[in-house]
Amino acid sequence: MDGYLGIIVIVVVVALLAAGGLFLLFRPGGKGVPPAPPKPPVEEKREEAARPPAREEGEGATTTVPPPAPPVVVPPPVKPEVEVPPPSAGRMVRLRARLARSQNALGKGLLELLSRDRLDDDAWDEIEDTLITADVGVSPSRAMVEELRTKVKVLGTRTHEEARGLLREQLLAQVGPDMDRTLHTAPHGERPAVVLVVGVNGTGKTTTTGKLARALIGDGKKVVLGAADTFRAAAADQLQTWGERVGAEVVRGPEGGDPASVAFDATDKGITDKADVVIVDTAGRLHTKTGLMDELGKVKRVIEKKATVDEVLLVLDATTGQNGMRQAQVFAEAVAVTGIALTKLDGTAKGGIVISVQRELGVPVKLVGLGEGADDLAPFDPEVFVDALLGD
């Protein structure tokens, strides 16, 4: 009996111990069973790949994750295709009809006056006024009238053709057919010819520079452009566009930089690239305390450290008439102008500006702008010009 009671006591003690252990294990604040270690990243990815796509609301609808968008590729700027310009020879002949349409009012008016049966003093005064109105200038107009009066007295009766011949002879004499209008663009051995383009902004100076480069490239020459009008950012951008169109290198500097430095670098680039011609576009306004004359003189002197300045082209707007003469004289004093580029000649009936500007400055008109097209800059031909004035 005692043995049986002993066994019962042992069982009760064991049961109490077991119950106490369970209580300690699961009481609030207990540690509990330690968590399972995290799965490695590879296993997580495999589980996500194997997991079916989530269902949306509605029977059978599923949501798929779209693929990532491809990166946006910005195409490089497309350079304009390099053009092959036509040669400059014969351009003025081809543009004669355009010139005649805008200029022959002068010629027709003079021919009508000269073809009258009777030429009295009033008629000669009218002829002189017509010439002055066409910007021929007072002195050249008077000289022409005197010559015409003498010839008419000698010839007596005049037909229309005789009057035309007399007027053509006088106009041609005033335009100056014997003046040297050669544009000096031949290189000197390994050094390129340098053309300095000057003039007031608004006359078409930068456009004339670009058109001249185009004409020279059409003649088979290699050209470098210098954007030395650093005070006008639009001038450098405009010249850059002209250069890209015909494959001419353009040297430019920072906005507001030293124009002489740009001119020097352009000349140096021309020598390095074995170019035939360097054309330098200069500023047309007063920007520095030293003055425009000093600035242009400095540009020319700096260029001459590397090469010879063969041409100094003064760009004039034909529509300004006599008002542009003072501007022309200022530039002529600043640098030794060798030739004139007369722009917008197709847009004015005052073609006599060719005569007056040559007489005032003593330098020939070498180039004329006869339109807004890229190939409308032409070497000046006195005979073609006079014939266009008089019409057919």
Image (cartoon, grey):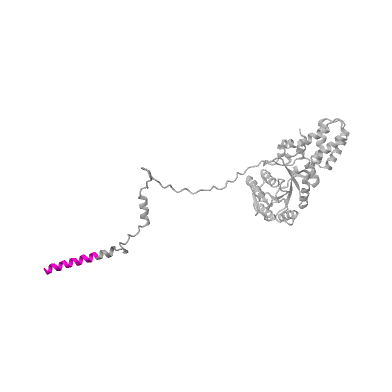
Visible in this render: residue 47? yes
Q: Quadrant of the C terminus?
A: top right
Single out the residue that lies furthest toward the left.
1
Question: Does residue 90 lie above or below 327 as drawn?
Answer: above
Front residue of 72/24: it is 24
Q: Is residue 20 above or below residue 376?
A: below
Residue 306, quarter of the rendered image: bottom right
In the rendered image, residue 91, in percent from the top left (x then y), is placed at 70, 39
Q: Which residues are magenta?
A: 1-19
Q: Position of residue 258 (x, y in %)?
A: 68, 56
Q: x, y (%) of residue 376? A: 69, 41
Q: Is residue 253 above or below residue 85?
A: below
Q: Is residue 258 magenta?
A: no
Q: Count the marks.
A: 0
**Quadrant holding the N terminus:** bottom left
Q: Left or right: 62 with respect to 114?
A: left
Q: Is residue 190 visible?
A: no
Residue furthest bottom as drawn:
2
- Where is 349 relative to 327, above or below? above
On the image, the x and y values in percent for residue 76 come to 55, 48
Q: Residue at x 63, y 45 (%)?
A: 245
